[in-house]
Structure formats: structure tokens, C-alpha cells
Image (cartoon, rainbow, N blue to C red):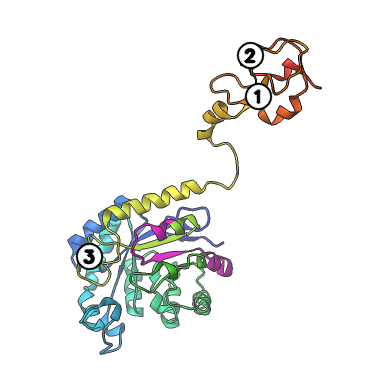
Amino acid sequence: MREVRVEKKIIGEGNPAFIIAEIGSNYNQDFNIAKKMINIVKESGADAVKFQIFKDEKLYARNAGKADYLENEIGINDIVKKAEVPDEMHKKLFDYCKEAGILYLCTPTDEDVADYLDDLGVKAFKIASYDLTNHFLLKHVAKKGKPVILSTGAGYFSEVGEAVNVIRGAGNDNIVLMQCVAQYPAAYECTNLKIMEVYEKAFNLPAGISDHSLDPFIVPYAAAAMGAKIVEKHFTLGRNQEGPDHSFAIEPDELIRMVDGIRKIEIAEGTGEKEVAKGEEELRKFAFRSIFSTKEIKVGECIDGSNSYVLRPGKKEPGIDAKYFEFILGSKAVKNIEANQAIKWEDVIAR
């Protein structure tokens, strides 16, 4: 599978999942709130924060109506307009992320925004699901030669393949695919985490999840356990705030727990080789059974079930391994063996 490098981070097999905290517009156009959120993301151990740049005139058609899922009387054009911030704000966000030591990512919603972000110095482009079939934007971004993180929500497999071909056709194979459910909040029965493996096999590219479900942990943890190479989750300082993306986002303590849980799952996955772990050595010696006399056995006496058994040694020196018990039964003692003593190979003569 291809590896994709985003600055110093490598996304691919054998590497920790690349974790993105999606701030989006959840900082409510307030730079001080954004700084606080960036600091929390850095503290959590996530790899990147992600923002979005909305330009109303190039996003929705005029008088596009209301988005039913938002249950808001305000039309989508007005919502987008309200979420707009001057480009200079993103320069400040980019600079502050650099100062804080966390990677800044942003979703371009048109070609001009992509050019601005490229000039700003972004290390990768995140493409929203709704631009999966926007080949003009995909080609424009791909030609910049930077990694493309592509969400695939509400799309068909054939459309994912077409998008990958467009990006590759522009000379860019640094692609990361993200399963995503374009539903807010996303239903678990729609999550389809198994498609990550399908993507990886079909396109030889790393894949992961952009999760919109309500629970802070279920999908990210399951994705990590299934080998997700990238995990994204929306982040807010409080779910009760007004705005389209707050209600299904995770709060600070949940973000910290999510990142910590993913890292522990990755450790728990291990190597796939079955061996005695370092932490098991003590109890292996203490509790793995071996052959002991259960009463005194005299020279020449047969060893059988009446005078021996396989027991856990505790802190006593172990005897012959338990797997040889049936082999030893019927053999004769070559010396006196006290009761409750480990039976060694030198104590017996084979039958």
C-alpha cells in the first residue's frame, strides 16, 4: 500500500492513525476561541486541526433554500454567509497552528480558495465529500502536488474510482481516502467501516474514516481496531452552541479520551506474532503446570495418577512440563522423590 507523507507524518500501514480534529467553523469566527481550541487539540495528541473556508458566491446557487437536517428557518445561503471569515483570519490561524506545533489543514471550496491555501503553505488539501464529482476542483488541487485527503460521503464506489483517476491523471498519487457518512449526525447502520479495506485493496491507497456519529468513541475506536490509517472527528468547546456543526461534535475531554483510546488500541493490536509477552513471563513461571509428586515415591516405584499430578508451581521450581504427563505415567523412579516435589527428567526412567 502506498504511504502518504504529510509534513513529518506518514499515513499508511504500520504507522499510527493520522488524527484530525475538525474545528471547521466551530470557533464562531472568534480568533481567541480558535486559539483555545487549537491548544486543546495540541494537548490531546491529535496530528492536525482542520478548518473550512466558505465563499457564499461559489458554494450554493442563489436562493438554494433550507437544509432540512439543520432544522433551521434560515436558508443555507445565509448560513454560509454568516460562517464566512476574511482570508486574513486563516493566515492568523495558520500562523498560530505553526506556533503551537500542530498541523493546519483546511478544506477549499473552490479553486481560488485552493490557490490561497497553497500560497499560505498548507501541507495537504482536504476535499469535502460534496466535491467528490467536482473533477475541475480535484484536478486543480491535484496539480499543486500536495497530498489530497478525499472524503467520499454520499458517493458511489464508481465515483470514488473516477475521482482517484482524475487526481492520478493530474500527476498526483498522494491520496488518502476517507469513508464518510453525509448525515448529521450519522447513523451507525450507515457507517460501513468495512469499505476502508475495500478502498485500500482496490486503489492501493491508505483509507480511514471521517465520523459524524453522536458517540465520541464507538466509530473512531472501531475504525482504529480495523486498521484505519486516518481518523477525523468534529470538535467543539460545547455541543449546545448555535451553529450547524456543534451538535454532533466532541468536546475537549472527549477529544483527549478519543485520541488516547485510539493510541492504546494501536498498541493493543500488536505484531501478529504469537509469543510470550514480557508482561506474561512472571505468571508463565508461576502458573504454567508441570509434573509434581503428590506423595512420596520410592526408588523403583511406578509413577502414576495416584502419586503424581500436573500442578501450578507457584514460586517452587517447576518439574517436567505438563504436556509430558501421559508419557511419564508408568515410568519408574530412579531415586526417592519426596511428596510435593517437582519431578525432573533425571528422577525417572522411561517405561
Q: Position of residue 175 (x, y in %)?
A: 48, 68
Question: As rendered, which of 83 and 299 lies closer to the eye?
Answer: 299
Circle 2 sits on which residue? 339
Alpha carbon separation for disc pair 1 and 2? 11 Å
Q: Quadrant of the N terminus?
A: bottom right
- Local packing at callout 3 (Cα closer than 10 Å; few below 14, some 14-19, many 20+) is many
Q: Which residues are magenta?
A: 197-221
Q: Position of residue 173 (x, y in %)?
A: 52, 69
Task: Work out which residue is located at the far right of the displayed protein and give it.
Answer: 351
- Where's residue 86, x and y in %? 21, 73
The amino acid pointed to by label 2 is Ala
327 shown above or below 49: above
**Element type where label 3 sits in the image:** loop
Asked where in the image residue 143 lies, by quadrant, the reply is bottom left
Q: Which residue is mark 3?
A: 27
Q: Which residue is mark 1?
A: 309
In the image, taking residue 232 as reference, residue 279 lies left or right, namely: right
Q: Residues within 10 Å of mark 2 (few under 14, many from 20)?
A: some
Q: Quadrant of the C terminus?
A: top right
Mark with earlier residue (1, 2): 1
**Residue positioned 57% across, 19% down in the render:** 316
On residue 65, the disc is none
Question: What amino acid is found at the position of numbered circle 3 in the picture?
Answer: Tyr
Q: CA distance from mark 2 to mark 3?
A: 75 Å
Say which residue appears at 30% left-offset and 50% top-offset: 43
Q: Is residue 204 inside the magenta stretch?
A: yes
